[in-house]
Amino acid sequence: MSKRLTCDVVIVGAGMVGAACALYAARAGLDVVIVDRGPVSGGTTGAGEGNLLVSDKEPGPELDLALLSGRLWAQLAEELGGLGELGEVIEYEAKGGLVVASTPDGLAALERFADEQRAAGVVAGPVQDGALYDLEPHLAPGLPGGVYYPQDCQVMPALAAAHLVRVSGARLLTGCTVTDVLLKTDGTVQGIRTDRGDILAPTVVNAAGTWGGEVAALAGVTLPVLPRRGFVLVTEPLPRLVRHKVYAADYVADVASDSAALQTSPVVEGTAAGPVLIGASRERVGFDREFSLPVVRALAVGATQLFPFLSDVHAMRSYLGFRPYMPDHLPAIGPDPRVPGLVHACGHEGAGIGLATGTGHLIAQLLSDKTPDLDPAPFRPDRFPEFPEEEDT
Amino acid sequence: MTDDRPHLAVIGAGPAGLAATVAAAAHGVRVTLIDSAARAGGQFYRQPAIELNAGRPQALHHQWRAWERLRDALARHVEAGCVTHLTDHHVWLVERQLERQAGGADRNAFTVHALLGPEQQDPVEVRADAVLLATGGYEKVLPFPGWTVPGVLTAGGAQAMLKGTLAVPGRTAVVAGTGPLLLPVATGLAAAGVEVAALVESADPKAFARRSRALAAQPGKVAEGARYAAQLLRHRVKLLTRHTVVQAHGDDRLEAVTVAALDTDGRVRPGTARRIACDTLAVGHGIVPHTDLAETLGCRLDGTDVQVDDEQRTDVPGVWAAGETTGIGGAALSLAEGHIAGRSAAARLNGTEPDPRIWAPAAKSRTKLREFFAALDTVYAPPARWTDLVTDDTVVCRCEEVTGGAIREAVDGLGAGDVRTVKLLTRAGMGWCQGRMCGPAVAGLAGCELTPSRRPFARPVPLGVLARAGEAEADRSAAAPPDALPD
């Protein structure tokens, strides 16, 4: 009745992180199966903008992972995949980010932040006065300046995940729900149980994103992943009037915030396909999928303040997604000492697309007993207290 | 001037919306009827533009008397100040707020957000105590090779052209697809002087005759069918049942179509293809309910239909729905549902429990018509194997020019299993129509059920309008969320 597959690694979650884990694990010589209860890119990956950012990260382990990931993304983009260069297929664009200050004080703070980032390896160029309008001619007049980050890039996330899965050669089982993590009598992982049978493997990678806490629970451990809702507005297709990823300086503060209340800060970017994407809102309201006019209106206000020409541009649609939020804003990456054989790769909040390559690369190194390029200690999955305080859900 | 009557916003001025408006306005409710067209009537009672000065518009319609009654009643209520009829208003969102009352109880309040004017750039907001969604449906057209050639139009589009502009789309037409709409389209075109070379129906309507119970309950519908059959005969329209159009030919302009017979499994029978010269192909495969506004309000759907109770109430307090949006069933059913919805809303807005006996005749005809259309639904269906006809280079999503091959590649090669993921991987459904046209086709090619996709904006809205939407409301409400705006 149940079809038994045997493989080295079974990855739970066919989003961006699962896809990258599959790719690098397969390249390390491991036999990989990916399962997802939905289609490929069906969760947060399909609701994201595809940012590969260093600009919004303060010095620390996340920035180190972002820099490693950025190098890996650039390498992948040059590989062949599908009908052409993989980068073209997944709409990889090294377009650079532009963080804009709205006041002289804001600019000073932004420059201090950039100085710290430079010390950590980020390329950040000051942009003052007219130079701002050379970079983005359609910005609102009167802005004092900003900082330009050439390492900020973008991909089309759903395409990126789907094509990385394909390039990996891993077996993909969609529409397949994991119902249990199977453990041996000694407490080590034996595989997973799904609604379509058992899959036996000595290693299970939890790449279930915002639902990573549920997969961890199947293995009997807690992982405090919480949904942090975000809306994105999509405009009608336009010629390239917005050239970079452009956002207001307070976005960085919003990303780093622990508040459950709604925060919005304008993030505006053109895409290869033409539409302009507008974010970003953050609020912790559980998995509430109801449309919210106040949130979307705030996005429109922010975007039209940054780029006044957008007032006459049509919003075609709006969608929402749930970022996998962790209390300390760092993902869980690596083996779970509580359940040998269980490995986590989730909880990347809004940075999962960007951090996916580095995450996959580290996971593959850890699975093949190589020395990881980065110290994985800050990402330890068991770094949280076993019974965390009840969060607002 | 203050008006303390409760206020109902009716969206859509087709048969359901008109019937609801008239019923509610006659029972102590102030109604704002909001519609995108310049004149009331909807698709069914679509009126020719006034400047065309049509002598006998009823020649293109049936149930003209019902229309005249509604039209006159609407005019009376408008005259009396009970109804405000907003034409050329394109609703993009209905927002529901809970207003805290002095006594502490919550009260429903709705804001209907619309765009006005030829460019649809000017915002209009209508506040109401309840809303009644009579948003109708839109035509389903499944793709086939050549369906994008100029000269191919939707069956409903051909009919709208006839009714609205009194113009005929061409000289020689083929009407094709499936469903009861094809009959009036073919006879309407023929009566207007177009040579209708064939009516190509993929179903076998004879199967319908076997469903005698539903038929017997609807002698009017039988007579209507017989009347169409006689008209087809009179205009010498060749009726090809269990046939389908397999290709439309022509580069700049339609020159001919190839039609073929279908076997019992819905496959094209080899050797039956024949070419029919024509400059117009009117094609349609049924109607899909328009549910965007209902979905964004959070109304529960049953498949693709808005779910309603016996009073036509949705599961969202203060929201009624009537007509095609609750399931496809034609004008007579829409009239019955609209009437019931209007009476129910009027009673409840005035704080009374409605007595269903007041709409008993409408309820009776609603029951019969729903049975009739459920039976019809089992007969009229696209060929079971219609996806076989979609070649890899057939454009499926016209807005984004996505081919059948690209969609198959996303499903078979990349792991897309539903319409949303196909959209993400191919852009099918991301264009101006937001997948309204290609949704059923993409679902078919992906091998999944057509589920309504969430479209928070029922139509594109300028960001400048969105940025100010409900501004007055936001100022008033202390519960407005704090925005983290630039420092």
Image: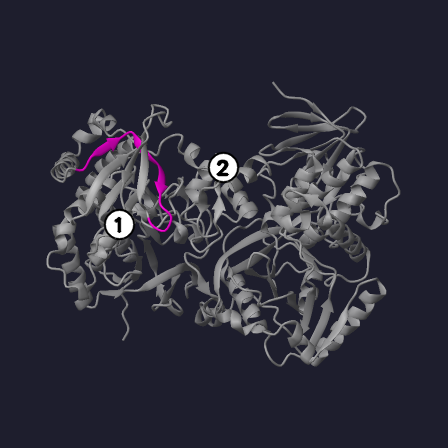
For this rendering, which residue is in front, A231 or A100? A100
For this rendering, which residue is in front, A353 or B303? A353
Q: Is residue B304 left or right of residue B19?
A: right
Q: Which residues are magenta?
A: B237-253
Q: Position of residue A340 (x, y in %)?
A: 81, 33
Q: Position of residue A187 (x, y in %)?
A: 79, 28
Q: Is residue A88 left or right of residue B288?
A: right
Task: State which quarter of the image contains the N terminus of chain B.
Answer: bottom left
* Residue shown at 72% from the left, 62% from the top: A56
Q: Say above or below: A114 vs B155.
A: below
Q: Position of residue B91 (x, y in %)?
A: 37, 60
Q: Is residue A213 visible?
A: no
Residue A2 marker: none
Q: Position of residue B24 (x, y in %)?
A: 23, 56
Which badge, 1 or 2, is on the more N-terminal residue?
1
Residue B446 marker: 2
Identify the subunit bearing mark 1: B
